[in-house]
Amino acid sequence: MNSTAHVDEEIHGKFLEVDLHGKLGREDYERFLPEIEKMILQHGRISVLVTMHDFHGWDAGAIWEDVKWNAKHFNQIARLAIVGEKTWHSWMTRFCEPFTMTQVRHFTLEQLDAARAWINE
C-alpha cells in the first residue's frame, strides 16, 4: 500500500526538522523512525521541529506506530516544536505536555523562524 504522505527530514546535529504533508501511514514510520533512533543513540536527547503543511493526520497503522514509539522514546526528546495552522495542531501540543518532561510548544507557519530559534536554545 502506498502512502499519501510526504516526509522531508533535515538533520542538524542534535536537531531534527520534519516536514509532514498528506496522511501518514505505518510505512512512513518504518522509513523515518530508524534515523531518529540513530540520532538518539548518538546524542542522547535531541530536539525536533515538526512542520505540518497540508497535513491530514495518520491512518490506524501509523497511530499505533506513533504510540509505541512515543512510549519508548518521548523522554529522549528535549524540545518539540509543532508548527502548523490548524486548531488541532495547537490542541495536540497541549495534549502532549502532561505525559512527558519534553518542552513542547506550538507555532504558526509564520512563526517558523521563531520555532527554529526556540528549538536551538
Image (cartoon, rainbow, N blue to C red):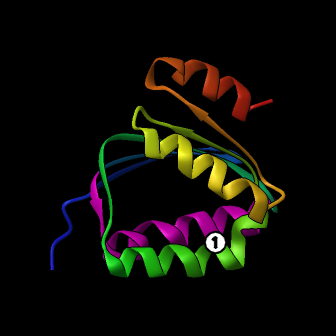
User: In screen coordinates, is 93 left or right of 77?
Assistant: left
Q: Which residue is pictured at 54% across the width and 40% down the height? A: 90
Left or right: 20 in relation to 15: left
The tally of labels here is 1
Visible in this render: residue 110? yes
Assign the C terminus to one quadrant of the image.
top right
Q: Position of residue 112 (x, y in %)?
A: 52, 24
Percent x, y for residue 34?
A: 53, 73
What residue sits 84% from the left and 58% below the top?
101
Magenta span: predominant SS is: helix
**Residue topped by disc 1:** 70
The part of the image, by quadrant, that contains residue 23 is bottom left
Q: Residue furthest left?
A: 1
Q: Is residue 91 above or below residue 26?
A: above
Q: Is residue 96 above or below residue 34?
A: above
Q: Amino acid at mark 1?
A: Asn
Q: Residue at x 18, y 61 (%)?
A: 4
Residues drawn in magenta: 22-43
- For this rendering, which residue is in front, 66 or 45? 66
Which residue is at the front of the view, 82 or 3? 82
Q: Does residue 50 appear in this view?
A: no
Q: Is residue 95 above or below residue 48?
A: below
Q: Quadrant of the N terminus?
A: bottom left
